[in-house]
Each structure stands twice: as C-alpha cells, then as structure tokens.
Amino acid sequence: MEVVQKDVPIYSEWVGTLEGFINARIQPRVTGHLISQQYREGSFVTKGTLMFQIDPRPLQVVLDQAQARLAQALVALDKTELEVKRLTPLDNAVHAYLANKAAVEAARAEVAQAELNLGYTKVTSPIDGVAGIAQAQIGDLVGPNTTLTTISTIDPIKVYFSVSEQEYLSYVKENPDAAKRAAHERRLELEMILADGSLYPHKGEFFLADRQVDVRTGALRLLGLFPNPGNILRPGLYARVRAITKMKKGALLVPQRAVTELQGTYRVAVVSKDNKVGIRSVKTGERVGSIWIIDEGIKPGERVVVEGILRVKEGMTVNPKPFTVKAEAELNPTKPGPT
C-alpha cells in the first residue's frame, strides 16, 4: 500500500492515581466517650449531617457550673454598682466595681466556651461527600487527635500523574510563550483508561502543575479533574491518563506490520514502479494505535509491503496487490486504542 502523509495528533500517556477533590478527616473537637454512630458507612452524606455523638453529660455539667459562676458574678456586679453610686467618688468602690465587671465578662466567655464544647459533642460532616468506614467504635475514648472517619468529595475527582523532567522541558520549549501555553492548557482534554482497559466516557481537564520537581524521582506532579456523575470512580483507583500533547505535521504513516526490526534497526520493503523490492532502513517516530510514523527513509506515495514482508528480498520482482480497505482505516487514526 502507499505511504500516507497527513497531520496526526500525538498522544502521551501516564499512570495516574485518583483522589477525592476534598478529603476531610473527621476529628472531634472535644474529648469524651463515643456513644453513637449516626451514619451508614460508604453512603453519601451532606454538609451538617450528624455523624457521631459524644457523651454530652460531662460537658453539660461544665456548662451548668459556668452559668452558676456567671450568675454569682452578676450579683456581685449589681452590689458594687449600687455602692459606686452611693459612695462616689471613693476609689475602693470604683475598683471593686471594675473588678466585678471584668469577672462578669470572664464568666460570660466561660459560658460561651462551655456551650461551644457541648455543641461539639455532636460531630457533623463539614462537606458533601462519600463517608468512609468508621475508625472508632462505640465506647471508645476519643479526642482532637482521633480520626473517626474520612469524607471525600468525589465529583469532580482528582487524578494525579507525573511527567519526567525531559517531558516538561520539551513541552516548555515547544510552547515558549507563557500566555499561549496557559491558553493551550485550558483547552487540553484528558482521557482516562481504567484498570479493566475501558475508556472512561467523560473527558477531563488539566488543573495544575506542582510547584517543584521531585528531587527523588525527577518527575513533576500534575493534577487533572474528571467529572464523576454517580460517584462511580473512587479514591485510590489507578488509571492511565492520556492527552494530545502535539500535532505532527505531514507525518508519514505505515501500518505497524510493515516495519520489521533487526538488531535495533527498523526496515521496510519498498516496491518500485517496476515492481522491484528495495529493503530500506528507516527512522521510526511515535506509534499511534496500529500505525507507525516514519521520520526518515521513505517518501509520500511510495508503496510498502504490508503482508508477506518476510518472504521478500532485496531486488526481488513481485506482483503486488493492493492491501484491503482495513489498512486504509488503520492509516486514518483519530486516537490510539485503549490498550
């Protein structure tokens, strides 16, 4: 069949890990014994949903004590206020009044803190999301350092993947203008291939690049976002992420089966106009699905052997037949296959 020349999108592919858009660790703000779990593990919960209940009785006692002290402080303030009005301008009476007024404010603050702490015995969800398995059991003594569970917002869901330093530098060199580069990244569409080899039906978008290259791996971490209706995808899944990173202009395309490898060199069999075979070394480029881009060694319109390549030799005269229509489909790729 003839060598085809056309513009071809080049895909790059990376291994990615999925994470929740927000992963909220649920930790109590007060210390106490857990008396109930109010949610179903693995279910979707909304912001404000009651998740756990901590025994409120000890903190109710603290609140009652704080309210009693406030009442005492108010009585003392009223008494000194009367004395100030009666004995003004005696300094002792004024000082006592000011001290009692400060004591009332302190008592009010104590009551407010006690009311807050009592409210904190009801542990609620701070976000909408999918709740994980409980990490504490009824009767456990829990506190601010205890993680009760984790809630993840997973629509959209994050996917982290890494590119090498070389890939990053090559991309920047091909897109030196920062404004145009940013515009290109906003238009960039990501595709995701799941662990079972299926193509995820929703397109993703590039979100951000990390501020630095990991000195241990020499890789730059990137983040993409994918819509996740129905919460099908879950944090922790592995997937392959791919995107069109460049367009190869005027690429020369042949089926992959037309290329043979021998001791690290690649060759194709070219059939001349007088039907004689010439074996040529070629420089191969990227593979796109079942086709191969040839950078050097052949020209547009030349005929290459696709089937029976192992039976032909240099200088052999052949009776070539056009390849089937299937080959034409191979040479008109739109994207690589999912495997």
Image: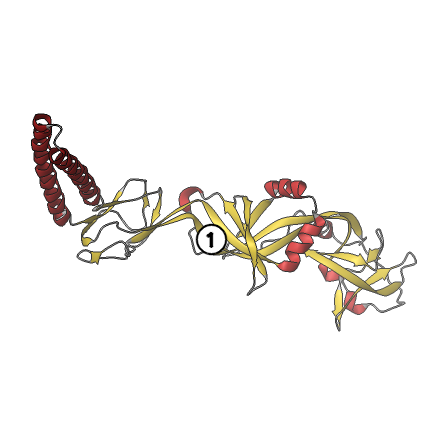
Instruction: Give the camera-side residue of 123 and 44.
Output: 123
Left or right: 179 in relation to 239: right
Query: In the image shown, does 117 or 95 lie closer to the viewer?
Result: 95
- x%, y% of residue 285? 74, 58
**Where does the C terminus fall, quadrant-wise?**
bottom right
Query: What residue is disc 1 on?
Result: 18
Q: Quadrant of the N terminus?
A: bottom right
Check disc 1 and report its element: helix, strand or loop: strand
Residue 32 percent coordinates (x, y):
18, 53
For image coordinates 45% across by 56% down, the residue present is 237
Q: Residue furthest bottom?
A: 263
Residue density around tag 1, few if under 14, some if 14–19, many if 20 or more, within 10 Å: many
| Residue 283 visible, this orientation | yes
Q: Position of residue 151 (x, y in %)?
A: 35, 49
Q: Image point 80% across, 60% down: which residue?
A: 305
Residue 200 appears anywhere in the view: no
Q: Is residue 114 left or right of residue 338?
A: left
Q: What coloring was used for the rendering?
A: secondary structure
Q: Residue at x 69, y 47 (%)?
A: 175
The residue most toward the front is 90
Position of 201 relative to 101 (above/below): below
Measuring 61% from the left and 44% from the top, which residue is drawn there? 185
- Give the x, y percent position of residue 206: 56, 46
> 64 or 70: which is nearer to us?
70
Residue nearer the viewer, 59 or 98? 98
Badge count: 1
Q: In the image, is residue 122 above or below residue 165?
A: above
Q: Check disc 1 and give the amino acid type.
A: Leu
